[in-house]
Every structure is written in C-alpha cells, then in structure tokens.
Amino acid sequence: MLFDWPDSPILLTGAVSPEQLDLPSDPDDLRAFAVQMQARLAVSEQALEAERQELAATRNELAAAKNAVVLTTLQIEKLKVTLARLRRMKFGQSSERMALQADQLELTLEELEAEQAHAECVIEGKLPDREPNAPANRPRRKPLPDHLPRDEVIHTAPATNGCTACGGTMSALGEDVTEVLEYVPGSFRVVRHVRPKLACSCCDAISQAPAPALPVPRGKAGSGLLAHVVVSKFADHLPLYRQSQIYAREGVDLSRSTLADWLGQVSWLLKPLVDRIADHAMASPKLHADDTPVPVLAPGTGKTATGRLWVYLRDNRRWSPSDKPAALFRYSPDRKGERPREHLKTFAGFLQADAYAGFERLYDPNREGGTISPVACWAHVRRKLYDVFKADNTSAAAVAIEKIKELYEIERTIDAEPPEIRRRARKLSKLKILDFFVWADDILARASARSPLAEALRYAVKLKPQLLAYTEDGRLEIDNNLAENALRGICVGRKNWLFAGADCGGERAAAMYSLIETAKLNGVNPQAWLADVLDRIGKGHPINRIDELLPWNWGGTDRHASAAGSN
C-alpha cells in the first residue's frame, strides 16, 4: 500500500511530532509508510548534496576570480612603482652607478663639455650666441654635411640705397656665409588618394583606379609612419606609450594599442626578410656570438622572468671588404644550452664567443650538420685581469695586460689585410701567446689558488687552444668585440622599455633588431630603407624577389646610416 504524502519540509525538519501525524494503525501499512519516507529522504539528501557541490564549485570560481583580481592589482601596483622608479631615474638622482659603462661615460662627458662651454662664456664675458675664442687644444668643428638641404636667408645690407657716410653708390664686394645647423621637428601630413569614377554613356560601365595598396590594410598608416614607429622603438629606444605621448603633442591621437597593432602586422610582413638575413648569416665561415639578459613580464604573475637575446654576427669586412655583414638576433626564455644549439643547427665553421658552457656541445666533432670550431676572446681575458689590476696596481696583472697589449698592437698593423697576410703576421702573436702561458703557469705555481689573480689566469689557461686559434687562420679575430658592439643598443634600450610584455614580444624584438642592426652595418638608413621596403611589399613585391629588398641590395638614395650615433 502506498501513501500519497505531500512533500513538506515539516516532515523532514521534525517540526511536527509523530502524535500530530495521522499515521496508519496497521503494522504492515506503517512499515510501508516508513519505507516510503526513507526513499523520499534519500532523494532529498541527493538533491541537497548536488546543491552542496554546485555551491562549492561556485565558491571555487569566486576564489579564483578574487585571486585573479589580486594578481592583477599587484601587477598594476608593480607597474606603477616601476614607472615611478623610471621617472626618478630620469628626472632625479639615480642611486645606481654602473662603473665603466660606455653610456654612463658618454653622459658624463656630455655634462663636462657643456659645463666647459658655459664656463668659457662666463669667463670671457661672451653671449651664448657668439662664438668664443676656442682654446688651441680644442678640435676644429667639422663642416656641416653636404647632403643636407640648404635654406638660404638673404640679410640685406643696411646701405643698399646708398652709403650712409657720404651718400655714394654701393657696389658688390662679395659676401660672407654663416651656416647654421637647424632642426625642423617631424611633421604629420595626410595624403589624400582621390580616385575619380568614369561612367560610359553607352553601356553604363564604370571605370575607376583600384584603391591604393597599403602595408597595413586595416590601418590608415603610410609606410613612412610605420617605419618611424619601428625605428623609434628599436633603434631610438622609445616605448610605444611614449611615442603616443609625442604624437599627441602634435595633435595626432594614436593610442598605444593602435601602434602595437601596427607593429605586430609590420613584423609579420617583414618576416621573410628576417629569414633571408638568417640564411645569409648562417652561410658565413665564421660567426661571432653573444647574449644579454632581457627582463620579460611573466603572464598572470605580476613578476618578471629573465629571457635572453642572442646575436649571431656575420662581419668579415676586415679581411673581405666586399662581404656583406648581417646581425641575426634570436630570443629565448632562458639560457639553456639547447637554445644556441637550435639557433645554430644549420651553421658550420668558426664560432667566436665567450666561455659559456652551453656552447660546449656545439664543438662535438661528430655533430650533425658539420663541425663548429671554438675561438675564444682575448678581450674577456684582459677584462678579468684589468679588474685585478684596478684593485691592486702592484699585482702581476699589470704584466699580463702589457703582454696582451702587444698582441693588439700586431692586430692594428694587419687590419684590412688579406687572410694569408694576417695569418703570417700572427706567427709572432703565437710566440707571444705561448710565452704568456709559460709566464701564467709560473705565476699560478706561486700564487694563492683562491686569489683573484689566480682565478683570472686560470680562466685564460683553460681556454688556451681557443685563444691560440685566431693565430692559425687569417679570417678570425682576436676578440669578440664585434658581437658585443651589436648588443650595445639592446643594453641601452633595456633601460627605457624596462621589460618585454611576453615571450612573443621578445621574439618580435629579436626580428626587428635583426633588420635594423643589419641595415646599420651595411651603411643604410633604417628609416628610409624600411619605409621603402614596406611600400614595395604593400604594392605586392614578389616573394621570389625578396633578395632585392635586403639592405646590401637596396637601391635607395638615402644610405646615410647613423651607425655611430644610433646605439
């Protein structure tokens, strides 16, 4: 017998006593009623458990959302603190002093030269717009470049209509010319592409020129502006948000996100050029390699990780002036040895680099892809010994520095000579190096094993075969300074853009640095070159003729690279 009891919370909560219920008097009916109630209770418990699980899931989602908010808040606060620190570094006194850093020395030199000029004006009572009598030891000012356009301003003589002294007629006596280097700020302009429509009076056919081809179809940016954004960020070290602020002062609203969108599209358009530069670099018989740390913002953590930018430099112009240099940059999220092995999987030849242990497996004679021979850097050896000398100028490090100096003096005499002449001249270098190691072994036998001098000498002794390698082949160099110079721009830029937004940003930076540094190495203005290349690509330049766009093949007229001042 089944009893149709309504679903009531009263029965489940015990709010009603059993005496208040109309229970069956027959024992069998009562037992049936109890079974029925137990079944209902089980169903209610299952429903309650399902509600509990749903509530727990909701609570977990809420907790995850709260954690995300907290992390985002922390990230924002970190960025605010970092921004404040950058402002202090820019406008206030910085507590961080990087000794012997080239950029710091250049800044110091700028201040000293400016102060010297100011002091000369004060001492001599000259106004700033008058040229003071320069001391005899000051270098003469270089003439202004001939390639710059000239604007001529005629200053009419006051006595044109007659001599102010006697009223006589004045005749031409020649002229004096004063050239002043002026700067006109970059300006925006709008190029209106007007496409008239023509209609046939007989058949109503319409004729119209096609829409202009743009490098970035989704944007309104011309190739010159796109090139300017790229060069400003990666050659002039201006982050996109700062470029946006500069453009706003000119009355042009270009948000950081818009500039970032353009940058992403441009990097995609230029990828075939980066690939060709990579092929060219890897085909060299010798490469210079180096790397530098790059802070990278770790997504979702509000913290920065340390990625690496690697440079693989082809520059054989010292012994082969017609060879075309190329700088290939690669990004990696860490400094594991597998990174350079992946970068150099198609390379075989000489690799001039530091003593980084991650390179060791590249020198396996049975390496797939060909043999890579290591060449060490004497500049690294000298640097370690110089640090010892600076701490104690009476140490034997002074002797070592003089011995290394003799090697560089030999190199100065054979710069730009053919490989065979360089190799023959280096027979003397080899004898001097062997003498250096005999001297080093003697010092190590007597010096304390833990002394800085011993550590510096052991570094050299450990690399003896690699340090001797350059004396056996005239194509090699005495040091790896070429690669270090290629990284200098990144070291400066790193202080401005602080960190990359993600690993993809590091990869994009590596590609853009490859293009810009390769252009500068080949004496090409990166701005003019990229503007022309982007214009040609936008107009459909064939991919099978991509080599025509490489910097050393580029036929542009503006080849005045700022190689010296762009870093």
Image (cartoon, helix red, strand yellow):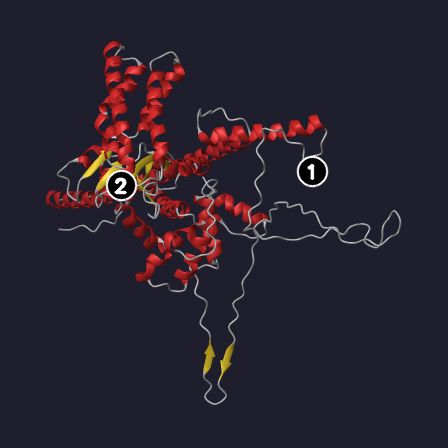
Front-most of residues 248 and 225:
225
Element at label 1: loop
Q: Position of residue 41 (x, y in %)?
A: 20, 43
Where residue 370 sits: x, y (%)? 17, 43
Q: Is residue 455 visible?
A: yes
- Amino acid type of disc 2? Lys
Mark on residue 286? 2
Work out whether 204 lies above or below 383: below
Q: Is residue 192 left or right of residue 435?
A: right
Label 2 residue SS: strand
On the image, numbered disc 1 is attached to which residue? Answer: 129
Vertical position of residue 254 compared to residue 412: above or below: below
Q: Residue at x 49, y 83 (%)?
A: 199
Q: Nearer the viewer, residue 199 or 117?
A: 117
Identify the image quadrant of the C terminus: top left
Q: Residues within 10 Å of mark 2 (few under 14, many from 20)?
A: many
| Residue 66 can be seen in this image | no
467 horizontally vs 405: left or right: left
Percent across and percent down for residue 283 are: 25, 47
Amino acid at dot 1:
Asp
Q: Residue furthest left?
A: 28
Q: Residue at x 36, y 24 (%)?
A: 405
Closer to us: 450 or 415: 415
